[in-house]
Structure formats: structure tokens, C-alpha cells
Image (tube, rainbow, N blue to C red):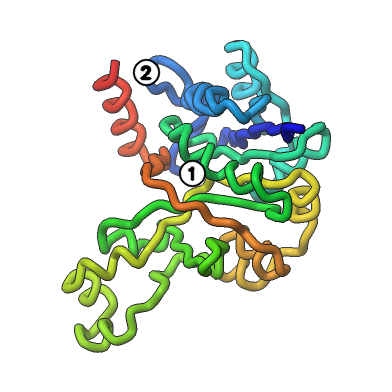
């Protein structure tokens, strides 16, 4: 029997750098509707729901004929918002699609879903993509992930992991080493914000106490690892394009115009 798969897209209205981000227009449509459209095109997904904390986002999504629900404004994380919605759903798998990725590739969502559909022992999956420049490896806003031989996460960090010790000693710093030996950069992978959860696990995960490493790195996925749960990480080729700054927004608008 085919598992029932529901995509939930958390969409907070507040954003420090881009207030009202879900409703900012790209190609004449609110950003959030581009994300909904992408998720709806994935064959394995049965239903797409926007989870918001703002009546304006709710109205825009419903006005376009799509599904949206109001959630508590008190949630600290997108996972908490996701769990509130999941608690009332009849579903096997919950896909967490970020509301600020209007260009997310269908193949990326499909890749994250694939191990969950094939192996019922996996409770959580996510994706990673190649890092190609030293600046991204060194940037604390680009989260890095290392995996074991079976593709399960060993650790996520804002710091460059793994650490090329011998090269860093030879060149005096990791920054100098990465610039002097570009081949080292191939050892790094960027963690993307897409997740798939088994519904029951998501409800358990959201109730786990915040863990020390999670607090230290401000990366909530570390909570799962610290509590002994495994996260399957699927490498994908397509680069994610998140909209976090005014510059990102303008680039997205140019991309839409060039493809029109």
C-alpha cells in the first residue's frame, strides 16, 4: 500500500531581512505560491499545506485556491510549526519544504523521499549538495554535513568539517589551505533545508528537549542525532536557491524574467 505523503510548507510572515517574505512577488505571484506549485508537481505527494502564523499569508494562499492553516505564533522553530500541523493529519510521511525556495527542483524533493519510501526503518531524511568555493566552506551561514559509509549523518556544523589538518598546518590556516588546494573543497557538502519525516517520529522529535549541541550550533537537526536517531542524507546535484536577502530576491526576479 502506497504511503500517504503530505508536504507542509512553514511560512512565517516576520523576517528580519525581508519582512513579509512569503508574500513578496516573484514574476507577479507571491513567493509562497511558487513553492506550493513546485511541491504539487511531485507525483509522490498527495497533498500540500502551507502552515503560517499570519492572516495575510493565509488569505493569499487560500485566495489562490491552495490549502493553508493557521498555526501558533509562539513556535520557536519550523519543526514545531510542522508538528502542530502533522498532529492533525492522517499521513505516513511529512515533507518539510522551505517556504523561501521558489526554485526547488522536483528531483531534490523526490531524492529525499526515495529512501523513506523504500526503507521503513528510516525515520528522517534530508539532502546535501556540493560545495564548490572556499567562501561557502568557510561561511557559518552555510551548514556543512559529514556522513558515514551508509549515507547517514555523523554531524552537522557551521564550521568547515572535515578539518584538513595537514594542509592547514602546511599553509598556516584552513582558509589558506582551501584556496591553495581547491581539490579539498570537494570534501565538503552543504546541508539543505529540506526534510522528510515519518509522522510519528516528527511528533516525538518535536517533544524532545533541546540538546547541548543544538543550542551551541543553533542547528535543530543536531537534536535528533544527540538523542540517538539517524538521519539519512541524500546527495543531490541541483543547488538550492533560498531567498534571504534583498539581493536574493532581485536575483530570483531576474531568473523568472529570463525564463519567461
Q: Nearer the viewer, mark 1 or mark 2?
A: 2
- Quadrant where the image shows the C terminus: top left
The reply to whether callout 1 and callout 2 are in contact (CB within 8 Å) is no
Which residue carries the number 1 mark? 16
Q: Residue at image x 48%, y 50%?
A: 192
Disc 2 crowd, CA 10 A, few/some/many (<14, 14-19, 20+): some
Residue 135, percent from left and from top? 28, 61
Q: Secondary structure at mark 2?
A: loop
- Horizontally, residue 173 falls left or right of residue 163, namely left
> Would you identify the image quadrant in which residue 174 lies?
bottom left
Which sits earlier in the primary sequence, circle 1 or circle 2? Answer: 1
Whether residue 217 is visible to the viewer of this picture, yes or no, is no
Q: Looking at the picture, tell me which residue is in the foreground, 153 or 253.
A: 153
Instruction: Determine whether, in the image, residue 233 is placed left or right of residue 132.
Output: right
Q: In which quadrant will I find the N terminus? A: top right
User: Which residue shows up at 57% across the image and 38% down it?
Assistant: 97
Residue 8 percent location from the top left of the image: 65, 34
Q: Which residue is mark 2?
A: 27
Position in image of residue 106 (x %, y %) = 47, 32
Amino acid at each position: 500500500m502506497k504511503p500517504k505523503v503530505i508536504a507542509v510548507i512553514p511560512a512565517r510572515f516576520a523576517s528580519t531581512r525581508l519582512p513579509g517574505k512569503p508574500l513578496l512577488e516573484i514574476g507577479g505571484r507571491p513567493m509562497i505560491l511558487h513553492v506550493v506549485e513546485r511541491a504539487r508537481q511531485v507525483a509522490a505527494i498527495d497533498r500540500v499545506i502551507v502552515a503560517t502564523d499570519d492572516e495575510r499569508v493565509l488569505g493569499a494562499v487560500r485566495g489562490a485556491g491552495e490549502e493553508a492553516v493557521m498555526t501558533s505564533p509562539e513556535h520557536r522553530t519550523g519543526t514545531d510549526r510542522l508538528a502542530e500541523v502533522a498532529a492533525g493529519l492522517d499521513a505516513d510521511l511529512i515533507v518539510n519544504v522551505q517556504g523561501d525556495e521558489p526554485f526547488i527542483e522536483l528531483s531534490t524533493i523526490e531524492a529525499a523521499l526515495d529512501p523513506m519510501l523504500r526503507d521503513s526503518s528510516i525515520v528522517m531524511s534530508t539532502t546535501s549538495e556540493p560545495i564548490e568555493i572556499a567562501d561557502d566552506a568557510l561561511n557559518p551561514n552555510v551548514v556543512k554535513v559529514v556522513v558515514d559509509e551508509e549515507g547517514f549523518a555523523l554531524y552537522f556544523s557551521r564550521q568547515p568539517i572535515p578539518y584538513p589538518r595537514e594542509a592547514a598546518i602546511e599553509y598556516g590556516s584552513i582558509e589558506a589551505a582551501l584556496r591553495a588546494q581547491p581539490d579539498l573543497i570537494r570534501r565538503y557538502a552543504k546541508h539543505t533545508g529540506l526534510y522528510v519525516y515519518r509522522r510519528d517520529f516528527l511528533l516525538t522529535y518535536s517533544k524532545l528537549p533541546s540538546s547541548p549541541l543544538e543550542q551551541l550550533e543553533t542547528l535543530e537537526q543536531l537534536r535528533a542525532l544527540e538523542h540517538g536517531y539517524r538521519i539519512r542524507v541524500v546527495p543531490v546535484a541541483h543547488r538550492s536557491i533560498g531567498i534571504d536577502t534583498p539581493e536574493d530576491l532581485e536575483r530570483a526576479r531576474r531568473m523568472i524574467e529570463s525564463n519567461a
